Amino acid sequence: GGFSSSSSSSSSSTPKNDSGATHNHNHNHSSSSTTTTLRLVTRWNVRRMSGGVHDQWMALPPPVAGGDGRIVHVFVDPTGTHTLLSARNGEAYYHHSSLKELQKLNGFGRNADGTWSSKEKLNGISASSQQQVTHGSSGGPNATKNKSKNKNKSSKFELPVQQGLSIGSYVTAVAWDRDKGTEGTSRKILLGTSAGEIYEYMLVSPNEMAAATKTTTGAKEGATKSALSSSVSDDPDEVTLLTKNPVLLHQLRSDAPVTGLVFERLRTGLLVLCCTSGRKKRTRFYTFYSAHNSSFRMAMADEAHASLVELPGSLDRAELKICNDHICMRTETGIYHGTIDRAQSGPAFAGGSMIVDSAILPHDGEHQKHHGGIGIGSSSGTSGNIPVSLAATPHHIITLQNNVVRFINRVSQKTIQNEPIEFVSMNSDRALDESNMGIGELMSDIRRPDQVWLRKARSLVHISSTQEDRDVWKYTLYKSLDMPIKRAVAGSRNVLSEDEKAQELLFEQAKSLCTNPSQKAVVTAVRAEYHLSQGRAELAAKYLSQCPPVLEPFADTAVRLALTNLGIDDPQSYGGSSLARDALKNNLPLITYLSDKMRVGKNNNDKMACTMIGAWLTELYLHERDAYPGAKQSLTQFLSQNVHTMDAKTIMKILTSHDVSATDCAAYAAVSGDIATAVNAALRVSPDAQDGVAEALTILNAAPFEIAESLYYKYASTLLARAPTSAGKSFLSRYTHGLSPTRLLPSFMHYERLRAERKRTNQVAQAAKLKNPFSKSGEDSKNLERVDSAGSRDMFGGGVEVQIMNSIGSFVDEPVTTKYLEGVIKLGCQNSAIFSFLISLYVDMVDEEPLYKFLSEHVPSAAVASEASRNAGPGAFADEGLSGPLDMSYALRTILGTGRHFRSAIKLYM
């Protein structure tokens, strides 16, 4: 377990004593032996003293009345400055570390004159019985006003509460304020008594009280109250009341003494824990909780959040220890332990306890067989297996029994180490007999909870735990594997039930307790194997990807996840689990594993690894797409998320080798920045589909013009052949960006030549059909038609082309070329070749109107330009700016060559 004990002579720690500190902490000791003794001298300091110093005793004030005035309990606060001594006759004494004398406290036992307090003070009325409790959080408009009213009423009651301890009772437990207590004042504390009552009290050092009085010399009593309350930040009247006498806070439903008392501040409220026990009395554990108030009185009065647990057996003194959020309590039958529910997720608000995961750990008497005899504080008989003391650390419960210190792991609830303790006897010439110093006791260092000290008489042994958390992660991991689990609904293996979610939290806790990466790797590997055995292969793959290559090599793990789906029955791959075998019959676990590995490569900027894994994932996604049509979206999402982490050409080769739609393939290439590959893929994957052309045009239109310009010229003929209308619109929209009409002109000329040939072919086929009405032209049944959408007409007619499987293209549309040429001329194109080619297209039309209209717009300006050129003299025709873009001679020859359109020819002469 990594624990060891050391005597005071070898200890180097500086403990701070909690309640139950050694009786002789106020004494100096002398010794002629080699044994070193310790003395608590000031806050958090331990002085080691050895021979040469005589014992210095501090005398107690004489008891006011006769009877048993022995000191039965000594309580030291966490700062080590305030000490409360409780006598059996009810009297109590206070000592501050800066003073050399003790002070008898008022309200404890008899008065100085030997009489008891009046019945008005000892009336048996508790503060909790007078306190009004309002449940629920404040949220209304009067919430602040109600809070202030409750605060003003906190120290004023309809009936006066009891001030002073009840007759015949004495202090048996103290709950110190571990967060706000200072050397000057203990702040508000709780006192438990032998009569089963809880009191509220406050200790103020004489120096603090004197300073408060000195600052208000000559003033009224209220000024002293104000000065004192300002130093402790509490209500003046309440401070004065609590410093004079203990105030009865609550009466428990038990006549057994209060043997354990502690309180904790939670997120919004206050939690008080208390236990009672006694010989032939029931052992009980109480919790009091105030959800929205930090007042002791509110916590005690809130019965809705109070709970009582009755534990079997009876014990003289049931110790209650707390460490962080873990509590443990010594009972006759075992150790009652649990955890404070700070998250408030338990049943506290439904009237349950604020302690969760509570259980009783039975006492183990096996080690008595190996370490027999009567040891520290043990007694003969059946009670020999009951520990005489216990302590709590962050991960263990430590018990003292028969000179043996047992270390019990809280998670595994098993004894992991027994440490024998041997004490060296002091010389017999001591002024005080050691047998009267009490039994052994385990004490905790409040600010270092992993430090535990063992006191026995004048000996103080430090029980070190430098590696207390060394094996805790193992026990937590074992516990998570041994949990009884109720599976979720059948058919939903990836949906966790409540028990499985709790198990996942235990796995996470085990991982958080690891102190090095190797331990975390083991937890992750075990977690993955467990989920795989339960049929949660995808979740297992997620954790397998987090394991280092030493535990789970990449190649071995990937093959292991793939074998079953490939039809290879290898029991080692699924651990012999039928659930794992069924879960591995698809590619999803392997996809999950590779995706997580690729994410790691992406974070490390390892493009080679990402491309390699990405290629594999692409193949898997393509396979899943073929098997499950709904997986297409997963492929698209994968490609879009990993655009810049994989080599685009490699992935494109894989995509184009499968029957992948142009949309999926082209979209990836476009986003990756490889525009040429994207356009080529869009046109190549679906050579007969208009969708590919539309996708290619979309990519070109969205890409920067500097990158897309050359691709427009390269694929212009293909685009015009498959989707002339869309291509013409795209070309025209790019004219203003710099797309040259002259470089596109060969593609348009090629398109018009093919269109004319197709037109003649259709005419021949039509004539043959008229001669034989029963023949059917194959070409006619496979052409591409054009459908106009109503209401969407534009300069290109607003047509929507539909495909009817034509390998050559659509060449029977309206003249798209004329629309494009007219558009660029309107946008300012002055190239003579563009004008001449447009004239040639107009001349071939049967209708003369388009030609005449065009000449009407451009001939006058051309005539003016020609006149200017004649006036300019020789060489003027070399300048296109003077001659104009329209070649008048070519236009006239072309029109006259047709033998028609004479009106247009006359227009040229005008």
Image: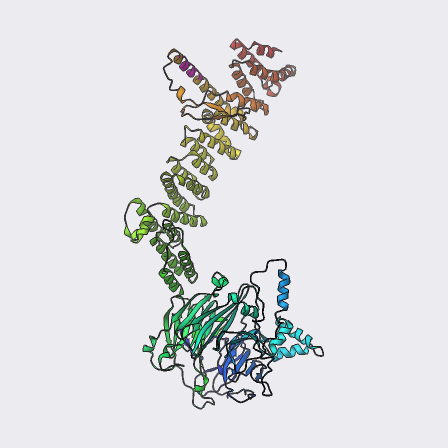
Q: Magenta span has 766?
A: yes
274 versus 909 height, above or below: below
**Quarter residue 395 falls in:** bottom left
Horizontal and vertical percent for residue 787? 48, 24
Vertical relation: 315 (above or below) 544: below
Residue found 37% across the figure and 19% down from its top: 778
Image point (52%, 13%), residue name: 846
Q: Please name the residue shown 61% across and 69% down the image.
A: 154
Residue 449 image position (x, y, % from top left):
47, 71
Establish if 428 lies above or below 162.
Answer: below
**Residue 876 in view:** no
**Is 697 rendered above or below residue 565?**
above
Colouring used for the render: rainbow
**Res. 620 image quadrant:** top left
| Image quadrant containing the N terminus | bottom left
Place of residue 265 in the rendered image (x, y in percent of width and height, measured from the top left): 53, 67
Depth order, front residue of 859/343: 343
Quadrant of the image containing the C terminus: top right
Q: Nearer the viewer, residue 25 or 776?
A: 776
Horizontal relation, residue 337 to residue 203: left or right: left
On whether residue 558 falls in the magenta region, the answer is no
> Is residue 457 rendered to the left or right of residue 127?
left
Prevailing secondary structure class for the magenta stretch in the rendered image: helix
In the image, 698: left or right of 130? left
Q: In this picture, which residue range is highlighted in magenta? A: 759-767
Number of labelled discs? 0
Position of residue 332 measured from the top left corner of the image (x, y, whole percent) = 40, 75
Q: Is residue 478 visible?
A: yes
Nearest the viewer among 257 and 761 is: 257
